[in-house]
Amino acid sequence: MIWDSWTAFFDMGGRGYYVWMSFGFTALVLAAEGLLLRQRRAGAEAANDRAEEQGDDR
């Protein structure tokens, strides 16, 4: 599809609200997933470090 202007591009033929809200929501979910994975990994590493300090062989 070719648009005549940036406004027409963002409007997406009247479907811009749906398209950009979907795009934004997907970006938000992917960012949250990355942050949650980082937090979960840090927790797992901390638990592993505590287990090593206690001599636990899990």
Image (cartoon, helix red, strand yellow):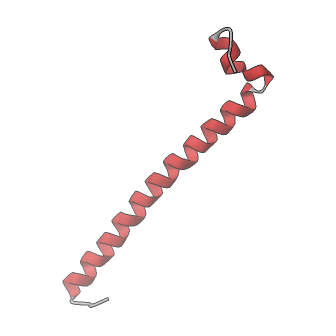
Q: Nearer the viewer, residue 24 or 12?
A: 12
Q: Residue at x 45, y 53 (%)?
A: 34
In this rendering, the answer to whether 37 lies above or below 48 is above
Q: Residue furthest right?
A: 14
The answer to whether residue 18 is left or right of residue 33 is right
Q: Residue furthest front?
A: 1
Indicate the position of residue 45 as horizontal and vertical percent values. Answer: 31, 70
Indicate the position of residue 39 as horizontal and vertical percent values. Answer: 40, 60
The answer to whether residue 16 is left or right of residue 53 is right
Q: Residue at x 49, y 46 (%)?
A: 31
In this rendering, the answer to whether 46 lies above or below 55 is above
In this rendering, the answer to whether 18 lies above or below 9 is below
Q: Residue at x 70, y 14 (%)?
A: 8
Q: Residue furthest top?
A: 4
Residue 56 in which image quadrant: bottom left
Name the quarter where the N terminus is drawn: top right
Indicate the position of residue 12 as horizontal and vertical percent values. Answer: 73, 22
Residue 16 in which image quadrant: top right
Residue 7 in which image quadrant: top right
Name the quarter where the C terminus is drawn: bottom left
In this rendering, the answer to whether 26 lies above or below 40 is above
The answer to whether residue 27 is left or right of residue 11 is left
